[in-house]
Amino acid sequence: MTEAEAASVNGRAALRWQQAAITAIVPQTPRVKSFFFAPPRPFSFRAGQHVDVRLTAPDGYRAERSYSIASAPETSSLIELAIEWLDDGEVSPFFHEVAAVGDDIELRGPIGGHFVWAIADGGPLLLIGGGSGVVPLMSMIRHRAAQGSGLPALLLYSARNWDEIIFRDELIALQDRRDGFELAFALTREPARRERDYGRRVDTAMLTELLARLPQATRQVFICGANPFVEAASQGAILAGVTANIIRTERYGG
Amino acid sequence: MVTRGFTGRQRPPNIAKRLPPGQSLTEDFPVLSAGPTPHIRTEDWSFTLKLGPKPLARWNWAEFNALPQTDQTRDIHCVTKWSKLDTLWQGVLIDDVLAAAGLEQAPTPYTLAHSYDGYSTNVPVADLVGGKAMIALRYAGAPLPPDHGGPARLLVPHLYFWKSAKWVNGLQFTERDEAGFWELRGYHIYGDPWREQRFTGD
């Protein structure tokens, strides 16, 4: 850990729960909706961090979950969480089917001091996301864009199909700015739709090709998704020549 | 405050009473770690007991496997909110590691567990001895797979599972309670799931 990292560790003081109203709900894909929260006590956070959410039943039973923040640190008064519907879920079906604009939800944050990135950490940045694993990476991409940074960055985003790509139009618009942000989709159940996208799972050959699109060797690698995806992507990146100790992972499970 | 419209998934009381606050039951075994999974060959593996910087004892894979083996069935609780009940582990109790090193008692009250990937986590000695913790070599009757920490991981089931360091290669006695990897990044210094000690200040 660097000194800067140590100095910026959050959570020196207790993380307090607060009631944050849902200000907007925006469908992103058939299975993902974005929920926007306005915490009465806004907190600054770093791209890649998450919040804990707590729901309380009338009998006192509580369920807690962690959700990565999708929004940029620059807009910390409004927190965006992109929540995926899980078929056997307890909390995600509540958000998708019950929660409404105006509801108060208990949350606290920011949480996590490792899977984080800021402009000052430098690049080139390689981001690899599978499914809803793109969410914390989106915060990093939005942070880079909000700062007007030209740091080379590349997002490889694997989704089942075109319609399940969260933030698709925004990502394509960011790529069209041609400011050093590169984008490749890897669709696992559909052929590629765009030139230089892929119609297969992430593999070493794909990563070798993509690393060559960066002007210099990548210095910061973030991989997020379900565990099998993260395993495949991280071992693939290592075989493509990335040093293991610059790879940070976050795995969704359970 | 009651959340409008939330009832939650009701669990039978015999299950519910085994779930610490804020935890939910999982049947599978999620994997979480800060970096890529290291693949360590057992012929390259070793485990070192240290006092500060000074090695006290060291075992290779064959030597470590020759130490007394113990089975434990335990509930485990991850800070990311899942709990898994009745997990079956086999390995060497920390009591037996200390005995094999010729230590009648631990030389200091605290430890840092160290791993092949550079990870570390702090655990007080009192939470390791008396049958409370082991270096686990097998899970559910099979060698521990790499993504679950194989060849060997620390198992301290009564604390949040980030304390059960994967890919463990040593235990270092320290004079003071020194924060490890996640403890330096906002996570609780002790991590008792029943007191919901997730983050600093909880």
Image: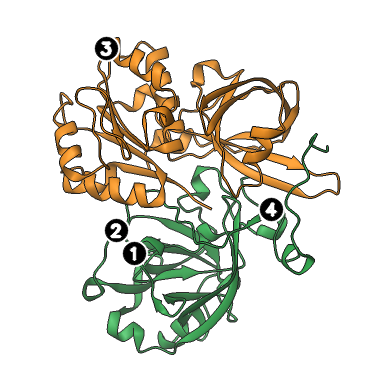
Mark 4 or mark 2, earlier in chain: 2
Q: Contact, CB < 8 Å: mark 3 with mark 4?
A: no
User: Of residues A181 and A205, which is closer to you in this image?
Assistant: A205
> Are discs 2 and 3 both within one chain?
no
Say which chain tag 2 marks: B
Q: Read off the residue under disc 1.
A: B146
Q: Residue at x 75, y 21 (%)?
A: A102
Q: Using the rendered image, report if marks 1 and 3 lie on a common chain.
A: no
Q: Residue at x 34, y 73 (%)?
A: B48
Residue A119, horizontal then vertical, whole percent: 36, 22
- Judging from the image, mark 3 belongs to the subunit labelled A
Closer to the chain start, of discs 4 and 1, is: 1
Q: Cβ–Cβ below 8 Å for labels 2 and 1?
A: yes
Disc nearest the viewer among 3 and 4: 3
Q: Are marks 4 and 1 on the same chain?
A: yes
The residue drawn where x is 61% and y is 34% is A109
Mark 3 lies on residue? A179
Q: Is residue B147 left or right of residue A151?
A: right
Could you tell me which chain the residue with mark 4 belongs to?
B
| CA distance for labels 1 and 3 | 40 Å
Q: Chain of mark 1?
A: B
Q: CA distance from mark 4 to mark 1?
A: 29 Å
Residue type, numbered disc 1: Pro
Task: Tell whether A31 sits left or right of B158.
Answer: left
The residue singled out by tag 2 in the image is B38
Q: Which mark is residue A37?
A: none
Say whether residue A14 is visible. no
